[in-house]
Amino acid sequence: MVVSLHACDTATDYALEKAVKMGASVILAVPCCQHELNRQISCEVLRPALKYGVIRERISALLTDAVRAQILERQGYDTQILEFIDMEHTPKNLLIRAVKRQGMRAPSAGKGLAEMEEFLRIHPLLERLTGEEGQP
């Protein structure tokens, strides 16, 4: 089991990559301070919303965790994103829970991820670390 608690920015990606390479049967990660995609995201359709810093930050954080979950699914994990503590205590309350799947990869794992990345012009570090960059 690998646990990562409030690893800032791309430190979560490094922890997830290590967990995947070790073949961890369970991964529990609570990400924090997701800045990587905030710096990258560029989308004309979303420009009116992304011009507001706090909105851009929150959208980027949510997208970062969704992308991480998708990459873990492509790596053979059943993945969920859960709220693990009430919002009144902390806004950083998302938990990525991944359990190693027995047998074959789910047919829908990571479906549509490449298209979303192209649309938003993002290149997530975890994809590069796991060798998943450009996968369908």
Image (cartoon, rainbow, N blue to C red):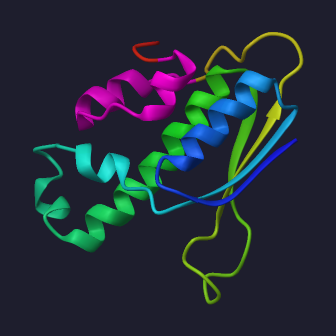
Q: In the image, 115: left or right of 83?
A: left
Quadrant of res 25: top right
Q: Say which of 13 and 79 sits in front.
A: 13
Q: What is the x, y in percent for residue 114?
A: 38, 22
The magenta stretch spans which residues?
A: 110-132
Q: Say which of 129 and 77 sits in front.
A: 129
Identify the residue shown where x is 61% and y is 20%: 108
Q: What is the x, y in percent for residue 122?
A: 30, 35
Q: What is the x, y in percent for residue 125?
A: 44, 33
Tell whether position 66 is magenta.
no
Q: Is residue 89 above or below residue 15?
A: below
Q: Is most of the magenta stretch helix, strand or loop?
A: helix
Q: In the image, 97: left or right of 62?
A: right
Identify the residue shown where x is 43% and y is 17%: 133
Q: What is the x, y in percent for residue 64?
A: 45, 47
Identify the residue shown where x is 87% and y is 11%: 103
Identify the residue shown where x is 25% and y is 37%: 120
Tell whether position 127 is magenta.
yes
Q: In the image, 103: left or right of 45?
A: right
- Quadrant where the N terminus is found in the figure: top right
